[in-house]
Image (spheres, helix red, strand yellow):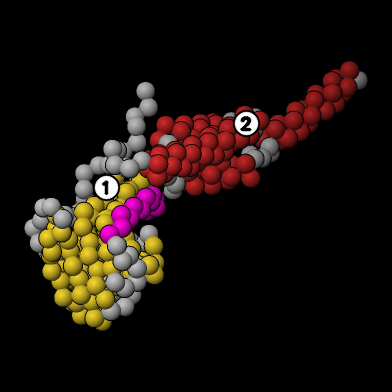
Amino acid sequence: MNRVIMKFVTGVALLSLVGVVSGCSSAQPPAKDIALAKTKLEAANASAAVSLAPESLRAAQAAQYALEAELARQSSKWFKSYEATTELATAAQAAADRAVAEATAARDETLAAANANTEDRRGPNLFQNGSFADGLKEWNLHPDSDTTLSVDTVGTNQRAWHAKYRKGNWSVIYQEFPLQPDTVYVYEAWVKTTAPIVALYWQSDIGRYHQIDHAYPEWTHLRYVFITPHWDGKPYRTGFNPVLMKGPGEAWLRDLRISVFQPKTKR
C-alpha cells in the first residue's frame, strides 16, 4: 500500500515538474519591444547621428548588441526568462532616441552659429576660380543657354563675371563637385542684375536655392547657410549655378565662394 502511495506521489510530482518546465520553456520574448528597438536603431543609423552624434550612436549600437546577446543566451536555455530582455530592449530604444535627439540639437546649434557668423569660421573656398581672376577658367557654359559671357573689372583689382542672357536654359554657368553629408555650408556672392534670377542655386538629389524671382539693381551681398542631407552617409555629387536667369537681361557676380562652416571645438 505504501509503495502504491509513493508511486502516486512521485507521479504527481513529476507531472507538476513537467508542467513547470513546460510553462517556463514556453515563455515568449517581447517581440514588439525587440522590433521597436531595431527600428529605432535603424533610424539612428540612417540619420545625422552618424556624423553629428557618433558617441551616442555607438552607445545605441552597443545597447542593441547587448539585447541580441541576451536573446541568444535565452534561446539556448531550457528555463527561459525574458525579464532582462524587456529591460534591454527598452534601454536600446532610449539610446537610439538619444542619438537622434543629440544629432538634431548639434545640427540646430551649428546652423544657428553659422547664421550668426560672418566670415571668421569659414573654411577654404571650394569653388575653383571663384574670384574670376583667371577669367572663365573652371566654369562651364550650358550649351542650351543663349548667353554672352565676359569678365569685367570692377572696383580696385576686382573681377566680375558678366552675363548677357537672351533665351534658352536658365543655368548659364556651373561647376560640379561633391558635398559631404550632414555638413553646414556657407554659399555667398556679390550679385547685381537687371532681371529676376534664382540666386545661389545648387542641385543634388533635388534643387535648392537662396532666393527666387528677385532682381538686384545694386551690388548686393547674398549669404546662404544650409546643411546637407544625410545621403546614406556618403558624399554626393552636386551642381552649382550661382544664378538662374528667369528672363532676358544681364547679371554680374563677384567674390563667389562656398565653404564648410567650422564650428568651435568644444573643450
Q: Which of the two residues, 133 or 80, is positioned nearer the viewer here?
A: 133
Residue 164 visible (yes or no): yes
Q: Which of the two residues, 4 or 139, is positioned nearer the viewer here?
A: 139
Indicate whether residue 181 is drawn in magenta.
no
- Amino acid carrying label 2: it is Glu
Q: Tell me: 148 left or right of 196.
A: left
10 Å crowding of disc 1: few (<14), some (14-19), many (20+): some
Q: Which residue is mark 2?
A: 87
Q: Tell me: 109 left or right of 27.
A: left
User: Which residue lies at the image location 38% right of the left edge and 67% below the top edge?
Assistant: 214
Q: Position of residue 210 (x, y in %)?
A: 38, 59
State the CA–CA distance, disc 2 to disc 1. Answer: 45 Å
Q: Residue furthest left?
A: 134
User: Which residue lies at the image location 34% right of the left edge and 29% below the top edge?
Assistant: 265
In the rendered structure, which disc, 2 or 1, sits on the residue that comes first in sequence?
2
2 vs 1, front mark: 1
Which range of residues does the magenta coloring cover? 219-236
Residue 206 visible (yes or no): no
Q: Can you tell which mark lies on residue 259?
A: 1
- Amino acid carrying label 1: it is Ser
- Element assignment for label 2: helix
Q: Which of the two residues, 46 or 182, is positioned nearer the viewer here?
A: 182
Indicate whether residue 229 is drawn in magenta.
yes
User: Which residue lies at the image location 31% right of the left edge and 66% below the top edge?
Assistant: 217
Q: Position of residue 129 (x, y in %)?
A: 14, 55
User: Which residue lies at the image location 8% right of the left edge and 58% below the top edge?
Assistant: 134
